[in-house]
Image (cartoon, rainbow, N blue to C red):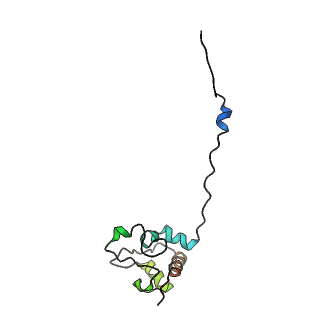
């Protein structure tokens, strides 16, 4: 004699379980996206104060604090910042970002300039 008990075998029960919706997309302004995507944030930090997540790895390096214009090597104007992004700074960890388009560099330079608090 065989006895079978079927409990919750209905496939309809499985289809009533719904996956949670994906998280909403976060929109980041283009200049800030350039700052994040090109890795500036990892050395210079979210506020540009030179305290990024990689700063501790670069102990002997002088990481400019974008908030303090006296820490800029080649100047704090938008044009000087753009030139530094384009060409880098020889002998430092600041590499050239020559792969970036002019409008990307200009947007990034303007974003960095807006971080400045200590104007000369």
Q: Residue 83's spot in the image, x, y percent? A: 45, 82
Which one is nearer the viewer's eye here, 115 or 74? 115
Q: Residue 28's spot in the image, x, y percent? A: 58, 68
Q: Residue 23 lies in what quarter of the image?
A: bottom right
Q: How many marks?
A: 0
Q: Residue 74 lies in what quarter of the image?
A: bottom left
The extreme left residue here reads 60
The extreme top residue here reads 1
The extreme bottom residue here reads 120
Residue at 61 percent across and 60 percent down: it is 25
Q: Is residue 41 above or below residue 66?
A: above
Which one is nearer the viewer's eye here, 48 or 97? 48
Residue at 33 percent across and 75 percent down: it is 61
Q: Quadrant of the N terminus?
A: top right
Q: Is residue 18 above or below residue 78?
A: above
Q: Residue 10's spot in the image, x, y percent? A: 66, 29
Residue at 52 percent across and 76 percent down: it is 108
Q: Residue 116's spot in the image, x, y percent? A: 49, 82
Which one is nearer the viewer's eye here, 103 or 117? 117
């Amino acid at each position: 004699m065989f006895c079978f008990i079927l409990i919750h075998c209905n496939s309809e029960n499985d289809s009533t379980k719904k996956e949670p919706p994906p998280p909403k997309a976060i929109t980041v302004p283009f200049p800030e996206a350039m700052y994040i995507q090109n890795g500036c944030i990892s050395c210079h930090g979210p506020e540009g104060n030179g305290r990024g997540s990689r700063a501790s790895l670069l102990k002997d390096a002088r990481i400019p604090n974008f908030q303090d214009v006296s820490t800029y090597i080649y100047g704090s104007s938008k044009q000087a910042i753009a030139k530094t992004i384009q060409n880098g700074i020889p002998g430092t960890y600041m590499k050239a970002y020559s792969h970036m388009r002019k409008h990307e560099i200009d947007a990034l330079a303007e974003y960095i300039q807006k971080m400045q608090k200590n104007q000369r």
